[in-house]
Image: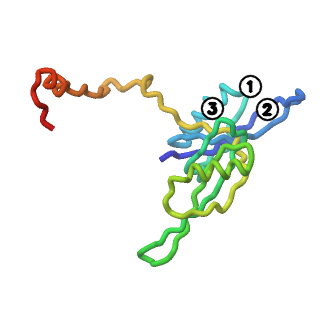
Amino acid sequence: MQTWFEVKVKYVKVDQDGRERKVGEVYLVDAVSFTDAEARIIEQMQQMIRGEFHIDNIKKSNIIEIYPHDNGEFWYKAKISIVTIDEKAGKEKKINNYFLVAADDFKEAFTRLEEGLSYILVPYHTTAMALSTIVDVFPYFKDDAQEELPPHLKRIEPEDEPQVEEEEKEEGQPVEE
């Protein structure tokens, strides 16, 4: 399960008309800890921002899943409620989950949320959806090929399957199944 952190970064931004102004933008980062989130956002910001910036705030996000899309300009935060039954207490229990959806408008965000949640078999209700302050999302992508292993470990390679069946077929012998 992914752990998302909301990181607020402050820096001086140049507007389209050439004026400089201080801005604070929120980014969503997939990380394993607060330290990892800070390191990852610094790495991303150094590529995006010229000049100085500082991390103003880092907090764990309640978002459990994101639905990115190539042509979604904004991020919408959606809240869904799932009603379950607590068998021990004999009462209904409402569980709230939060999702982030990339879309150009509210209607498109709702449609993409419904498509993304089509795998859920229990009934749910979308109780809230609003335009989020999150500017961009940085999921964690692991590059297995470039990752170095410590010297005391060895990478396990998959074994080749034996070619016994094909050899027996060529010799005219029956193959047992």
In the image, 69 versus 52, the foreground residue is: 69
Residue 60: x and y in percent read 59, 49
Distance of label 1 from label 2 (alpha carbons): 8 Å
x 50%, y 68%: residue: 84
Find the residue positioned furthest to the left.
173
Q: Are marks 1 and 2 in contact (CB under 8 Å)?
A: yes
The residue under label 3 is: 42
x 55%, y 51%: residue: 64
Residue 26: x and y in percent read 69, 42
The residue under label 2 is: 12
x 60%, y 60%: residue: 80
Distance of label 2 from label 3 (alpha carbons): 15 Å
> Count of labels shown?
3
Q: Secondary structure at mark 3?
A: helix
157 lies left or right of 44: left
For residue 150, above or below residue 68: above
The residue type indicated by label 2 comes to Val
Residue 39: x and y in percent read 57, 33
User: Quarter-wise, where is residue 177 in the image?
Assistant: top left
The residue type indicated by label 3 comes to Ile
For residue 64, above or below residue 150: below
The image's colouring method is rainbow
Q: Which mark is residue 51?
A: 1
In the image, 141 versus 13, the foreground residue is: 141
In the image, 130 versus 104, the foreground residue is: 104
In the image, 148 versus 73, the foreground residue is: 73
Q: Are marks 3 and 1 in contact (CB under 8 Å)?
A: no
Going from N to C along the chain, the mark reached first, 2 or 3, is: 2
Crowd tier of the residue under label 1, counting other residues whose Cα lies within 10 Å: few below 14, some 14–19, many 20 or above: few
Q: Secondary structure at mark 1?
A: loop
Going from N to C along the chain, the mark reached first, 1 or 2, is: 2
